[in-house]
Image (tube, helix red, strand yellow):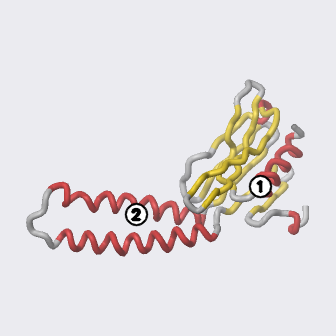
């Protein structure tokens, strides 16, 4: 496998005993989210400072900034995850392991590879004010008839297709 045939943000390693595919989450969106988060904290700090100077304040107004703090924490965490996280896909002869690190993120799983009969790609169109945002989801179909989401929110079809092809070749499904 040459470096040129790898899609951007994806690395592939054949460790002999298992196949490892690593996908970086870093994108222009991550930088936007980081800047947005910084601006959010500037505004939130100003609101909290102004609120703390008011002597007589209702209970609701006293705790209202807490909503902004929680939203800021979620936004900051998402920005850091988008900058630093990677998805690790480890294909072993008997299992398929998917995890997101270094920051905790939902979606990790371990599957019995002998139960997977095929992999598929699902195209997801999300409608926004500016138009349609297309994302891709990699699925695994099992012998029991279950369809399991392996990876979601992939921005490029070539990422999903590359990972699908690598897993199919490894497991020979």
- Tell me what residue is drawn at x 73 percent, y 26 percent: 145
Q: Quadrant of residue 132?
A: bottom right
* Towards the viewer: 44 or 173: 44
Return the mark for residue 131.
none
The one of 102 and 40 positioned closer to us in this rendering: 40
Picture mark count: 2
Other residues around mark 1 within 10 Å, as few (<14) / some (14–19) / many (≥20): some
Q: Is residue 122 left or right of residue 27?
A: right
The residue indicated by pointer 2 is 72
Q: Quadrant of the N terminus?
A: bottom right
The residue sitting at 57% across, 72% down in the picture is 31
Give residue 10's quadrant in the image.
bottom right
Q: Position of residue 166 (x, y in %)?
A: 84, 50
* Residue 43 locus on image (x, y percent): 34, 73
Q: Is residue 160 above or below residue 80?
A: above
Under circle 1, the secondary element is helix
Relative to 144, is 43 on the left or the right?
A: left
Image vertical order of residue 109 relative to residue 161, above or below:
above
Instruction: Tell me how far mark 2 sits from mark 1, CA to CA.
Output: 32 Å
Q: Is residue 22 left or right of residue 48?
A: right
Q: Earlier in the sequence, mark 2 or mark 1?
A: 2
Is there a contact, CB below 8 Å, between mark 2 and mark 1?
A: no
Question: Based on the displayed image, in which of its 4 quarters is residue 133 positioned?
Answer: bottom right
User: Which residue is most to the left?
Assistant: 56
**SS at badge 2:** helix
Image height check: is 21 above or below 95?
Answer: below
> On the picture, is 104 further left or further right than 108?
left
**Residue at left offset 54%, top offset 53%:** 104
The residue identified by callout 1 is 157
The residue depicted at 55 percent of the width and 59 percent of the height is 129
User: Can you tell which of label 2 and label 1 is closer to the viewer?
Assistant: 1
């Amino acid at each position: 496998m040459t470096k040129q045939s790898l899609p951007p943000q994806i690395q592939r390693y054949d460790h002999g005993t298992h196949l490892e595919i690593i996908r970086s989450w870093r994108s222009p969106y991550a930088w936007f989210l980081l800047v947005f988060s910084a601006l959010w904290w500037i505004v939130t700090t100003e609101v909290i400072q102004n609120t703390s100077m008011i002597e007589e304040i209702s209970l609701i107004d006293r705790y209202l900034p807490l909503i902004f703090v929680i939203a800021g924490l979620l936004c900051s965490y998402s920005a850091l995850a988008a900058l630093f996280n990677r998805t690790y896909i480890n294909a072993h002869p008997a299992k398929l392991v998917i995890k997101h690190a270094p920051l905790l993120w939902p979606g990790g799983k371990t599957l019995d590879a002998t139960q997977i009969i095929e992999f598929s790609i699902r195209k997801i169109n999300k409608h926004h004010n500016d138009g349609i945002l297309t994302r891709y989801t990699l699925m695994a179909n099992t012998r029991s008839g279950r369809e399991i989401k392996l990876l979601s929110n992939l921005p490029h079809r070539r990422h999903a297709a590359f990972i699908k092809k690598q897993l199919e070749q490894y497991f020979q499904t």
